[in-house]
Amino acid sequence: MPSFAHLTAALALVGTSLSTPVQLNKREAFSVEQVQRGTYLKNGPAQLVKALRKHGKPVPQSLLDAAENRANAANVFSLADVNGTVPAVPNDENDSLYLSPVTIAGNTLHLDFDTGSADLWVFSSLQPAASTKGHDVYQADATKEKKGYTWKIAYGDGSGASGKVYADKVTVGGVTATSQAVEAATSVSASFAQDVDTDGLLGLSFSTLNTVKPQQQKTFFDTVKPQLAQPLFASYLKYHAAGSYDFGFIDKSKYTGPITYINVDTSKGFWGFNATAYSVGTTTTKANVAGIVDTGTSLLYTDASIVQAYYRQVSGASVDSAQGGYTFPCNAALPDFAITVGGVKQVVPGKYINYAPLSSGSTKCFGGIQANTGLGFSIFGDIFLKSKYVIHESGSTPRLGFAQQAGV
Ligand SMILES: *[C@@H]1O[C@H](CO)[C@@H](O)[C@H](O)[C@H]1NC(C)=O
Ligand SMILES: *[C@@H]1O[C@H](CO)[C@@H](O)[C@H](O)[C@H]1NC(C)=O
Ligand SMILES: *[C@@H]1O[C@H](CO)[C@@H](O)[C@H](O)[C@H]1NC(C)=O
């Protein structure tokens, strides 16, 4: 399921070389919690929709209208002055994933924006009704079908989906793509069907990871990029609170201190970069840490030696093989963790590294930092991103900009 879904392609990447591709044990680690979350959500989808409205910054109608008028007038995206903000709201009390409203062909769906994959896929009217219960769906319009095109995605936790492709109108925070590849599901795995809050994913990695055949399609970001005020988007995920994604502009009110830019390694289709050191509390150790940022992964996965160095400083921490990773007493004091990128430390406050109790009322908690065994690189998922404002810029030389969130 998307919450623990490990990015698609990272696993596609290592999947061939590993006997068990899901070495991260993500799903196992959280299987108990998943069941509970299911229960929790069954009672509360309406509340979550309300929460979205309550916490989400409403998109000003004027901006919507403006973007639309411009797109219509030009009928192409030639006017490069559009920008927009869309809320990103945690789906549960542990920030398992974040949802953002997206309007597709006039209907609003709530999608998990995933910088670790490149497909915009949605629950659709093509699926059997039983598998779309509780979801908002894309009403597939036969006149918009890209005939002969199909897609199929497999996430690292064993979940997946597949279907047909349409070219339709997609609006995110007032930014509209009039002809975006919308991948309409004909079939989704059970875990997706059960997660009634998530109506699909919106991939924001490089388009080279898109799974559409016979011809790869562009991500939403790549489609609208020429029309954006600046060729970038920023993630602003927050700890137990609603954040946002900004498209086409940098919101100076959302971070403090400098933005540190580093060129991106796009060779695997990810927003890849290298850190040069890590810190546990005040102790900094030099290390080359090759990693990616990925909003679609809940935790921070890094080299086992680094993870070990971290939990050595947490009293009562140990590897619990039944849980698939490090756990510790929920009241343990947690040191800050940092990586050094472009010479500047990017700090994750200690309390963010307490991901969640193993189950409701449990006094043992699951660590937000876990080993990337079998993966070969680090994934800086939500545990890392929640304290950052991260700029994903895709001009002639793609780069990432990291800044510490204001007020963290
Ligand atoms: C967003 O775009 C509008 C024009 O469409 C521009 O006036 C405004 O300054 C932009 N805002 C930012 C923050 O870039
Ligand atoms: C980043 O790390 C990888 C893996 O260790 C290495 O192959 C690559 O050369 C490094 N890139 C830079 C720019 O240092
Ligand atoms: C979230 O946290 C609560 C406790 O606050 C816990 O009972 C529950 O199992 C967790 N759910 C998930 C999906 O991690």
Image (spheres, rainbow, N blue to C red):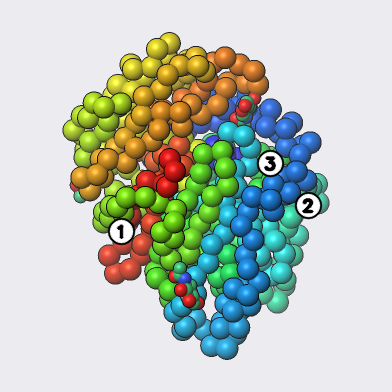
Beta carbon at label 1 within 8 Å of ligand 2? no
Which residue appears at 30% of the width and 26% of the height? 281
The circle on residue 51 is none
Task: Classify mark 3: helix, strand or loop.
Answer: loop
Q: Nearer the viewer, mark 2 or mark 1?
A: 1
User: Marks 2/1: CA distance?
Assistant: 42 Å
- Do the CB atoms of the residues marked 3 and 1 lie less than 8 Å apart? no
Image coordinates of residue 213 in percent, x first then y, are: 52, 63
Left or right? Give the position of 370 relative to 290: right
Image coordinates of residue 314 in percent, x first then y, are: 38, 17
111, above or below 28, in the image: below
What amino acid type should be assigned to the residue bearing mark 2?
Pro
Q: Which part of the image, by quadrant, shows the C terminus?
A: top left
Task: Classify mark 2: helix, strand or loop.
Answer: loop
Query: Toward the viewer: 69 or 205?
Result: 69
What amino acid type should be assigned to the residue bearing mark 1?
Arg
Which residue appears at 29% of the width and 37% of the height? 339
User: Marks 3/1: CA distance?
Assistant: 34 Å
- Do the CB atoms of the residues marked 2 and 1 lie less than 8 Å apart? no
Question: Which residue position holds label 2?
Answer: 128
What amino acid type should be assigned to the residue bearing mark 3?
Asp
Q: Residues within 10 Å of mark 2 (few under 14, many from 20)?
A: few
- Do the CB atoms of the residues marked 2 and 3 lie less than 8 Å apart? no
Question: Which residue position holds label 3?
Answer: 195
Image coordinates of residue 67 in percent, x first then y, are: 57, 77
139, above or below 283, in the image: below
8, above or below 306, in the image: below
Q: Nearer the viewer, mark 2 or mark 3?
A: 3
Query: Toward the viewer: 405 or 71?
Result: 405
Question: Which residue position holds label 1?
Answer: 399
Image coordinates of residue 206 in percent, x first then y, are: 41, 59
Q: Quadrant of residue 241?
A: top right
